[in-house]
Amino acid sequence: MSTKTSKHQTAKTQLSLHQPLPIGSKVRARIKSSFIPRTTHGGSPSRGKRKQARPFSPRAPLHLVLRADRAKGLWSMQHRRNKAKITAMVYTYAARFKVRVYQYANVGNHLHLMVKAKERKNLADFLRVLAGRVAVTVTGARKHVKRIGKFWDDLYWSRLINYGRDFFNTRSYVLANELEEFSKKHREAFRTANQRMANTEGIDFWEGGWWDP
C-alpha cells in the first residue's frame, strides 16, 4: 500500500513540475532571470532591492540616465549658467577616464549618455566624478559650509546596448531628447518675439494660423 502511495505522489509531483507558472509570480520571474541575463540596472525600480553588480561588458555600449527632480529653475541643468559647464565636464571626464561618448543629451532635469568603457572601474570613476561635480556646480554646495542634501534621485539607470538596430534606435532616441529641448526653446523664443511685435505693431501671426510650433 505504501509503495503504491509513494508512486502516486511521485507521479503527481512530476505533473506539477510541468504545469505552467502563473504570469507575474515571483517563482516564474526567478526562473526566467536565471536563464536571461540582466541588461538593465538602477533607476526607480532598484529602490529597496538588494544591491547587485551592474551589468557591464567592455564590448557593449551603455545607455545611462542620471535624473534629478530638484533640477528646476536656477538648478536646471539647462540653465544658461550650467549648460555649457556640464557639457564640458562630460567630455573632459570622459577623456580623463578613457570613456567613449557616442551621444549626450541634457534635458534639464536629467542627462542621457550613450557611452562605452573598456574597464568597469573607468566607467565607475567617470560617473562618480561627473555626478559629484555636476551637483556641486548646479547647487553651489561646498563641503562643511553649504549643505543642500541629496541632488540626484536614485542610483543612475543603465542598459546594455546591442550593436545594429538597438544601437541606432538608442542613439536616435538620445538625439531626439536633445533636439526636443532645443526646438522647445526656439518655439518659446519665436512666440515671445511674435508677442512683442503684436503688442507694438498690432500684428498677430498666430491668428492667421501659418505657424504652429
Image (spheres, helix red, strand yellow):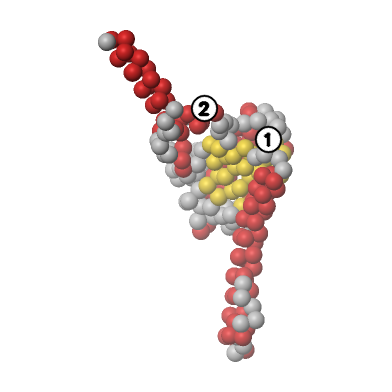
Residues tagged 2 and 1 counted as in contact (Cβ below 8 A)? no
Residue located at (63% from left, 74% from top): 190
Towards the viewer: 24 or 127: 24
Q: Visible in this render: residue 56? A: yes
Which residue is farthest left?
1
Q: Which residue is mark 1?
A: 60
Disc 1 residue crowd, few under 14, some 14–19, many 20+, Cα 10 Å: some
Q: Earlier in the sequence, mark 2 or mark 1?
A: 2
Indicate left or right for 7 with 107 as reference.
Answer: left
Residue located at (53% from left, 52% from top): 109
For the C terminus, the quadrant is bottom right
- The x, y position of residue 10, in whole percent, is 37, 17
Residue located at (64% from left, 33% from top): 123
* Amino acid type, mark 1: Ala
- The x, y position of residue 83, in whole percent, is 62, 54
- The x, y position of residue 62, in whole percent, is 64, 39
**Helix, strand, or loop for circle 2?**
helix
- The circle on residue 97 is none
* Amino acid type, mark 2: Ser
Indicate left or right for 12 with 197 as reference.
Answer: left
Alpha-carbon span between mark 2 and mark 1: 21 Å
Residue located at (42% from left, 33% from top): 21
- The x, y position of residue 72, in whole percent, is 50, 56
* Pair 2/1: label in front: 2
Towards the viewer: 27 or 111: 27
Disc 2 residue crowd, few under 14, some 14–19, many 20+, Cα 10 Å: few
Q: Visible in this render: residue 197? A: no
Q: Which residue is mark 2?
A: 34
**Helix, strand, or loop for circle 1?**
loop
Count of marks placed on residues: 2
Determine the image quadrant of residue 108: bottom right
